[in-house]
Image (tube, rainbow, N blue to C red):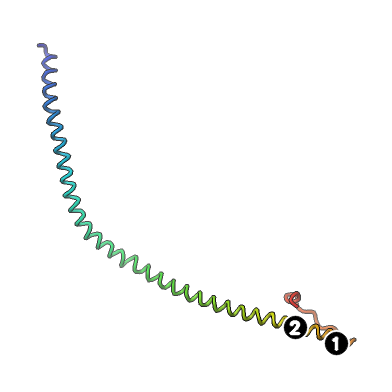
Amino acid sequence: MSAIQWLSAISGTLGAIVGSGGLVLIFRARAQNRRDHDEGAAVLRAANTEEWDRLVQALHETQIKPLLERLGKQDERLDAQDRKIAQMDEEIQTWRSRYWSAIEHVRRLTMWITRHMPDGIPAPPIPPASIADDL
């Protein structure tokens, strides 16, 4: 046999041995990796649960609680503003009603004066432009 034949025979045999052993090693390594990962994940879950609880508690104390307090104060301020707006609406309606009652009275007085005013007496003064259309 020549050197090339010997080399191919040896490499084929070594390839089969290493190949099958390599596959076994790969499968064993993957299985061990899964076991290690599962054990590590369990440890991390236990540690993370405690740490997560502490983190959530700290977040609640530093962020959520003050936020809820501020929102409560804003809610109170909004309620106070709603009451103030309702009160102002009532006042506006009252003033508007009084305004139009006064305008109607002034119209009647103006009409009465023009009907009953004797000749030769000067006419009453012209109303300001801002309310002239209302009269």
Residue 40 in the image: above or below residue 109: above
Identified by mark 1, the residue type is Met
Give the quarter of the figure containing the N terminus: top left
Q: Position of residue 26 (x, y in %)?
A: 16, 35
Q: Position of residue 51 (x, y in %)?
A: 23, 59
Three-letter amino acid code at disc 2? Val
Q: What separation in Å lies between label 1 and label 2 (alpha carbons)?
A: 16 Å
Residue 17 horizontal side relative to residue 99, left or right: left
The residue under the point 22% across, 58% down is 49
Q: Position of residue 57 (x, y in %)?
A: 27, 65
Quadrant holding the C terminus: bottom right
Crowding at label 1, few (<14), some or many (≥20) Cα neighbours within 10 Å? few
Tag of residue 44: none
Q: Indicate left or right for 84 with 47 as reference.
A: right
**Where is residue 107, by image quadrant?**
bottom right
The mark that comes first in sequence, 1 or 2, is 2
* In this rendering, position of residue 3 left or right of residue 54: left
Q: Name the residue at 15% across, 39% down.
A: 29
Q: Residues within 10 Å of mark 2 (few under 14, many from 20)?
A: some
Where 40 sits versus 1, above or below? below
Q: Are marks 1 and 2 in contact (CB under 8 Å)?
A: no
Q: Is residue 38 left or right of residue 107?
A: left
105 vs 73: above or below: below
Q: Residue at x 14, y 31 (%)?
A: 22
Location of residue 114 by image quarter = bottom right
**For numbered disc 1, what is the local secondary structure?**
loop
Dot label at residue 106: 2
Residue 95 vs 2, above or below: the answer is below
Residue at 72% from the left image edge and 81% from the top image edge? 103
- Residue underneath mark 1: 117
Residue 118 appears at what percent x and percent y? 88, 88
Figure quadrant of residue 34: top left
